[in-house]
Image (tube, grey):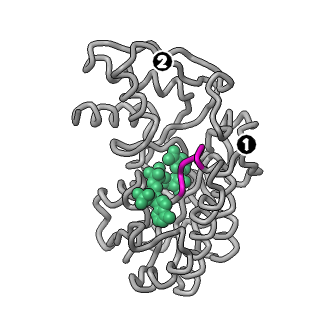
Amino acid sequence: MRVLVTGISGQVGGALMKTAAPTGITLIGAGRDKLDLSRPEGIAEAVSAIAPDLVVNPAAYTAVDQAETERDLAMMVNRDGPAALAAVCAALGVGLIHLSTDYVFDGSGSRPYQPNDPIAPLGVYGASKEAGEAVIRDRLEDHLILRTAWVYAVEGKNFVNTMLRVGAQRDELKVVADQHGTPTAAEDIAAAILAIISARSTGSKVAGTHHYTASGATTWHGLAEAVFARAEPVWGRRPLVQAIPSSEYPTPAARPAYSVLDNSSLDKAVAVPRRNWRAAADATVGLILARA
Ligand SMILES: NC(=O)c1ccc[n+]([C@@H]2O[C@H](COP(=O)([O-])OP(=O)(O)OC[C@H]3O[C@@H](n4cnc5c(N)ncnc54)[C@H](OP(=O)(O)O)[C@@H]3O)[C@@H](O)[C@H]2O)c1
């Protein structure tokens, strides 16, 4: 099975390309140079030239705050690009696994969100991802939309790396403690996608909209504390993390106060590996510190 993977310079796309694919599955990476989602008109040709049996699309415009002032670009990359991908997949008769986000929810809930719960994004990024989901559902029957959350990896622009950078320089920092979600390692998302592709190649197809995150939940403050607990024995010191409300850290885009995702529909459909958020964060922080 030839699987085309987009966004290979990103956290999830990069993790996919680094993970050994199961026997019989060949991953073919296509970066922005080969497949530019902001140029939907070139997508059919780029995908047809590769002639995949399946497409995985982790590529996205992911700058949540910047999206507030770059609406057109965010919509192009997160809605129009995926629309073109879905159209060419339909024409070629192949499936599409598309990544989406917990930020499609408004965060007013108080129990983990299920895939079919009402969506109401708070910002442009969430709206653009929601629009991408909608157009894929509309254009391609053989789709899997996988929403994930709070993604981090050893490399990449993410909260874990930011905390390690800032915490190495400061003895005290303030982190918001009233947004609840589930930090998820890119490598775990990659492993889950490969398990889904394996199941598919043996005739067990997962389709529709599902959620995949680590297990458990925390706040950004809780994640910062976990990062520094792991760094303390290496650094010989531990920064003090002051818990603040989001109102004390205003950002251009509002974030959901609660975006924990219920993973049970995916778990019922297929066996995917899953770690607890803290164990996975611990392991990743260890890898980052070992490289430094
Ligand atoms: N990061 C999170 O916290 C988070 C949370 C929930 C859901 N998600 C979703 O999970 C997926 C993977 O996220 P991630 O964290 O791996 O993202 P990421 O690290 O920001 O990587 C984004 C990838 O998309 C590529 N890309 C951006 N614009 C493109 C374009 N016009 N054409 C082609 N490729 C383009 C980037 O390529 P360049 O290097 O060329 O820019 C990069 O490879 C995305 O769908 C995202 O919406 C992410």
Q: Is residue 57 visible?
A: no
Whether residue 92 is in magenta: the answer is: no
Q: Residue at x 48, y 28 (%)?
A: 223
On the image, the x and y values in percent for residue 270 come to 51, 58
The amino acid type found where label 2 is placed reads Leu
Q: Which residue is mark 2?
A: 173
Q: Which residue is mark 1?
A: 106
Left or right, 188 with reference to 292: right
Left or right, 248 with reference to 272: right
Pick the residue in front: 197 or 76.
76
On the image, the x and y values in percent for residue 222 come to 51, 24
The mark tally for this picture is: 2
On the image, the x and y values in percent for residue 247 come to 68, 24
Q: Which residues are magenta?
A: 61-66
Q: Secondary structure at mark 1?
A: loop
Q: Picture quarter containing residue 28?
A: bottom left
User: Disc 2 versus disc 1: distance between alpha carbons?
Assistant: 27 Å
Specify whether tag 2 is near ligand 1 (CB below 8 Å).
no
Seen in the picture, residue 156 relative to 5 is either above or below; the reply is above
Left or right, 138 with reference to 202: right
Return the disc, 2 or 1, that comes first in the chain's sequence: 1
Q: Residue at x 60, y 58 (%)?
A: 74
On the image, the x and y values in percent for residue 110 come to 72, 33
Seen in the picture, residue 121 relative to 270 is either above or below; the reply is above
